[in-house]
Image (cartoon, rainbow, N blue to C red):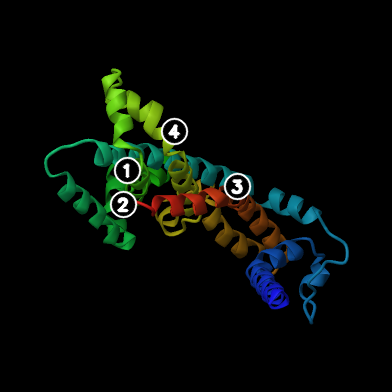
Amino acid sequence: MIIADRFSKVLLYLALILAALVMMFPILFAVSTSLMDPSEVNTFPPTLIPSSPRWSNYVEVARSFPIFRYLLNSLIVSTAVTLGQVLTASLSAYAFAFMKFWGKNALFALFMSTMMVPWEITIIPNYLTIRSWKLLDSYPGLILPFLATAFGTFLLRQFFMQIPRELEEAARIDGCGRFRFFRSIAVPLARPGLLTLGAYTFLSTWNQYLWPLLVTNSRLMRTVQIGTRFLMNEEGLQYHRIMAGVVLFMLPALVFLLWGQRYLVRGMMAGSVKG
């Protein structure tokens, strides 16, 4: 019985390792290609491991293409949207979780119903609004439409509702106002939810393509996803340089994902316990 259990665990781990390798293969292939010599890229059968890593590919693509400008643009936009969503979602979630006012449940249901509206439907109204405010081709134009989210409000409300009401009542008796309770007690206790929302928002904003393509015109205002497309157009068949640029574009998001993975898993699990 013990041998059968161990054998089943070994098979399970082997299957998980195989699945992980399959999922990681595109990333590993991109890194490998970015270090190849141009003569190795177009060989048949394809070469999976470079004979001698060519780190100069990264230097060449950085000199010929404004990669770091695109990285800076995406970093500014993603950070601003993340901070904005965490702030607005935490305030609205606190109101729905702790405050009592007429029509709260109906208003919350209406608020949540906006999650069923596809983003594609709001693109034209958002574009016309940004254009009327003369914010095209600017950081505010990339940031403003995403500063509030119903999903973030729903997620943080789940965390706030797990805070015992007795704690709020005791704080009110001791003279703690609503904002002080929100800042000093509610927000620290809901830290896993805030980190979850922050990680999710940052990664989703970093991977945006359609909206930055629509509202930016100048080359220096493009984000990394648009920059990847322009890199492919400019470099042509120089796949070693293209992959070097792709790896540089992918690296910040990959590092952030590895850092925030535990918060994403823990936050989603904790936020689904009580609603």
Viewed as shown, does residue 166 lie left or right of 208? Answer: left
Nearer to me, 263 or 75: 263
Q: Which residue is mark 1?
A: 161
Q: Residue at x 44, y 56 (%)?
A: 213
Residue 179: x %, y % from top left: 31, 26
Q: Mark 4 near mark 3, Cβ–Cβ under 8 Å?
A: no
Q: CA distance from mark 2 to mark 4?
A: 19 Å
Checking the image for residue 275, the label placed there is 2
Q: Mark 2 near mark 1, Cβ–Cβ under 8 Å?
A: yes
Q: Mark 2 near mark 4, Cβ–Cβ under 8 Å?
A: no
Checking the image for residue 188, the label placed there is 4
Q: CA distance from mark 1 to mark 4?
A: 14 Å
Q: CA distance from mark 1 to mark 3?
A: 27 Å
Checking the image for residue 259, the label placed there is 3
Q: Residues within 10 Å of mark 2 (few under 14, many from 20)?
A: few
Q: Nearer the viewer, mark 1 or mark 3?
A: 1
**In terms of sequence position, does the residue under pointer 1 or pointer 4 come before the other?**
1
